[in-house]
Amino acid sequence: MASRAAKVLMKHFPQTWVAEKDRAGLPARIQKILSRFGALLGEPEIFDGRGGDDVTAIACFETQQAAEAAVKTLLGADMRTSAEKKATGNRPPLESERFWVEIQPAKTFSTAVPPRAQPLQALGTELPEPAIPDESYILVRGFPMTWMEPQVKYLFVVFGGTSSVRMVPDAEFGHAARVILKDIGAMERAATSLNQTDVGHLAGISHA
């Protein structure tokens, strides 16, 4: 059976790679490094952290084996340029200067959006939809029942983090989460990127 695709999440790039004037070339730099381990599906995606200081990237390998090889080789590597090392007196790299990469399950893309205002059913009893402010949010459904707010928040680190995570009842999965990001402009992109991600038994993420 063919190996399934796998995403990798990356951060702690050299400062010269993420400087304003060099940011446009970051996807190509990442692709060049990762291609040594295997073929990629599409171009790496780049996301700015809060304030633009913590740049994160996601890339998808065609195979799990390639992703594992990349993580094994690159995790913790000192990615500073010679000039950056010299400027610090050739001291050992700080934790924030060591390349960080982690495998994330690859998504199976779906454009299905669950209804926003349908009443929930549990044990034959209709549960009224909890009142929430009239604002845009991301609905996360299908994650394991053992998950709480920290696990849900972790999904959105690459998109700048969350400002609000609210657990709500869900008839099919027991509970769901309504998420608002710190960067409201990243809401739709986060929902599209994470929808149908295979994390535990994650079933769907939609933008409402």
Image (cartoon, rainbow, N blue to C red):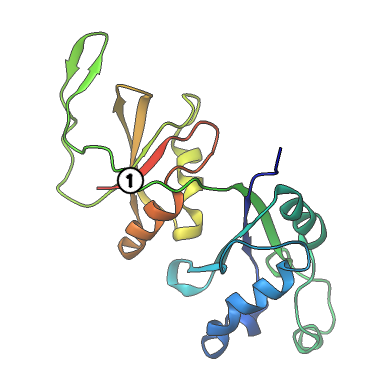
Instruction: Determine which quarter of the picture holds residue 203.
Output: top left
Of 180 and 170, the residue lying toward us? 170
Position of residue 77 measured from the top left corner of the image (x, y, whole percent) = 79, 66
Mark 1 nearby-residue class (10 Å; few <14, some 14–19, many ≥20): many
Q: Is residue 72 above or below residue 86?
A: above
Q: Residue at x 47, y 74 (%)?
A: 52
- Residue at the top extreme? 123
Q: How many marks?
A: 1
Image quadrant occupied by the N terminus: top right
Residue 129: give x, y in percent of width and height.
18, 29
> In this figure, which residue is indicated by the disc labeled 1?
206
Q: Is residue 119 above or below residue 189?
A: above
Residue type (three-letter) at the residue carrying disc 1: Ser
Mark 1 element type: strand
Residue 31 placement (x, y as % from top left): 66, 72
> Quadrant location of residue 41?
bottom right
Is residue 87 shown left or right of residue 134? right
Residue 163 horizontal/vertical position (percent): 35, 52
Picture residue at 65% right of the left edge, 85% below the top: 16
| Nearer the observer, 3 or 22 | 3
Kindly give the residue lying farthest to the front in the view shown: 1
Residue at the image position 19 percent from the left and 11 percent from the top: 125
Q: Nearer the viewer, residue 112 or 119?
A: 112
Q: Please, is residue 38 above or below residue 27 in the view? A: above
Tell me which residue sits at (17%, 16%) in the image.
126
72 left or right, relative to 5: right
Q: Is residue 95 left or right of residue 58?
A: right
